Amino acid sequence: MALKGNALIGQSGGPTQVINQTLVGIIKEARKHGEIETLYGAVHGVAGILSDNLVDLGNLSYPELDLIAKTPGAGLGSVRKKPTEEECMTILRIFQAKNIRYFFYIGGNDSAETAHIIDDFAKREGYDLVVFHVPKTIDNDLLVNDHTPGFGSAARFVAMAFMGDNQDNKSLGGIKINIVMGRHAGFLTAASVLARQREDDGPHLIYVPERDFDFDNFLQDVEDVYRRLGRVQIAISEGVQRGGQPIYSTGYKDSHGNIQLGTAGELGAFLADFVKREMGGLIFQKQLRVRADTFGYVQRSFPIQSEVDAREAYMVGKRAVEYAIVTEKSGSVAIKRLGDDPSSYASDTFITSLDSVARHTKSLSSEYISPRGNDITDEFKDYVSPLVGTLPKMGYIEGIN
Amino acid sequence: MALKGNALIGQSGGPTQVINQTLVGIIKEARKHGEIETLYGAVHGVAGILSDNLVDLGNLSYPELDLIAKTPGAGLGSVRKKPTEEECMTILRIFQAKNIRYFFYIGGNDSAETAHIIDDFAKREGYDLVVFHVPKTIDNDLLVNDHTPGFGSAARFVAMAFMGDNQDNKSLGGIKINIVMGRHAGFLTAASVLARQREDDGPHLIYVPERDFDFDNFLQDVEDVYRRLGRVQIAISEGVQRGGQPIYSTGYKDSHGNIQLGTAGELGAFLADFVKREMGGLIFQKQLRVRADTFGYVQRSFPIQSEVDAREAYMVGKRAVEYAIVTEKSGSVAIKRLGDDPSSYASDTFITSLDSVARHTKSLSSEYISPRGNDITDEFKDYVSPLVGTLPKMGYIEGIN
């Protein structure tokens, strides 16, 4: 006999450009199943459950849903919170009071962990509940998954931003440093490689947190590119590290032997300062501009979506409902890639355990990083390209450097 | 008898998303006129003329031109340089050697000044030359013009970035400060007002350089919005000032009476620090996130164009050629708006003197700024809206704060 009752959706962690596709995928699919009576949304995730702040999602029209799906940010509000034992008890009491039998939680590995805790607690208390974690993260660092919804659209923004900025850098020359999101995993920074359409296009150098950052190698790399092209565009992950410490906190020894440190959130300024100090002669002689931009939240919120990413984000929501109702068991929706040919991309979903995607994360594998650690390989291009979609084509006049 | 000879195009100053539309407008129109024999491009503006680095633009195919028109950045390379008297002599010698009779210089007020200097010099030397300045600037601060090519596309990026970031801010709450380009004029920052689709949408506060920044009023404004909405999204121009000085250099007196200063290029970090220090109690109590992003060069280079802006950028290029050939007199192409109804926008060009747009710039007029100096009026919305074009519509779930 099928588990019947109400359902609840929550969104958690950093929002993405397509997290509402997933929300709408769940809502539309839930409406097709008699097992789900009323569908509620938790306002700001578990925080909304704890304060009994739920909204009935039954009144949203299909045109409204289609608009919400295209809107960045978490339509229900989001939260960064892992419930305590005591809070789990409160949550369970509210689930009982509202007869919630299906709980869908959209988020990254921390949200999977939260879903896992609630699921465990319900089991221990003998309360029939199906909990599904639905994947989302621009960091692309969820275990088990080939890739995660949210990444493709953020990667699309990053690739397009680098394409435009490359033309800007080419126009006026100089050294340009762009800091890309990703505290631990370099996937998003690596996606900047898609901006290259010609051999001399930037980014000319790409640094990710998966490799120890070497200040001397970096200087040498920058100078090499400058000597070759007369300009340099650099992609650096906000999480670049040295021995596990952020590079601004380890600092660098300047030419007088003094250690120069930076502060959190100012990695771009710190690196621009480093380049100006240590390449001062060249910079003065050639009157080079050295500039740094930190892309910031616009990477995950600018209102553009990758087509594949939008479709998959919708699909994982829809599948979460199907899986929950068919299996009546808790789990997490995961994405696999079908085949390896980037020109005929296809993907499918499968069920993995909540535990398998909770807590831990994955990094950019070493085959995707060049031996010197200053570039990204063609293997990664093949991996990421279908997720980002067709990019605008740039026009060039021959003979301009 | 018509002036016959070769023509030269240069691009100058900060590039825009549509400066190549203007370039292509000039190239396509020049091909229609027998008066122009060979059309050259100056690589990096006057720097390219001085080093005799010119490219023949006759070989570019129409499909190539259409692609170039859609590409951000200066296709010919750009430069920030005003020629000296001696350099003007060199330029004139090269013009004579190459029989350049038409010179088109695309740029802002500094480029108009350069065009003016070269024009004056040729007149003094008795060399027949028609010089046309063609307007471009994301700052929208050229005199005589209703608005300038480049502004609409940058404003479109800013409005879209604020729309997405507003949804992000709504998702997780807190205080978000976004620094927008514009050292002297607040037009681009003011365009963030277009991001508002509902009453509670951000930006909730907008500060431009045209008003002295008041730290106490700012704090009061932020707290008021926070008390009302539980979150705050703020647009601030990079050029905000106090008594003509950048605010980080004037600093603010903290609650202990000590003056806190900032450094150039870190306005966002300076303001976030200010808010954290001075609203510490509230921020601690509510565990508020305070974040700042500086949008940076992506504002003028992200590969999107406003439709009206792209069309007008092309038009000013085309008209520059027509005016030059018909009048055989130097000048600058200017844009006027036909009628005041924002729902039936139309524009046209006219000729103004080089002198009239050189050197000086204009600011946001006071009718566009709210009396308290923390918001932008509906009059400005009517002014800017047609230049930016239709923006994506956001979807909302009722009852989410």
Image: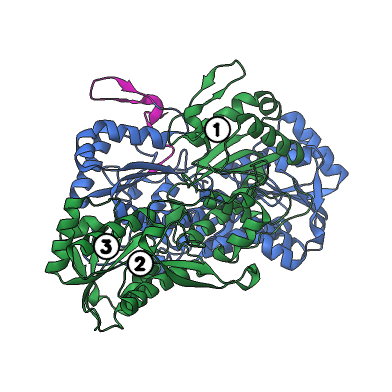
Chain colours: A green, B blue
Callout in the foreground (2, 1)? 2
The part of the chain drawn in magenta is B236-261
In primary-sequence order, the first of circles 2 and 3 is 3
Same subunit, labels 3 and 1: the answer reads: yes
In this rendering, position of residue A323 left or right of residue A289:
left
Tell me whether the residue at label 2 lies in contact with that at label 3, contact meaning CB atoms closer than 8 angstroms: no
Label 1 sits on a secondary structure element that is helix
**In the rendered view, would you say B13 is above or below B328?**
above
Residue identifier under label 3: A119
Residue B381 magenta: no
- Any mark on residue B118, and which? none
Residue identifier under label 2: A331
Residue B245 magenta: yes
In this rendering, position of residue B180 left or right of residue B280:
right
Query: Residue A292: which quarter of the image?
Result: top right
* Kind of residue at disc 1: Leu
Residue identifier under label 1: A271
In primary-sequence order, the first of circles 2 and 1 is 1
* Kind of residue at disc 3: Asp
* Kind of residue at disc 2: Gly
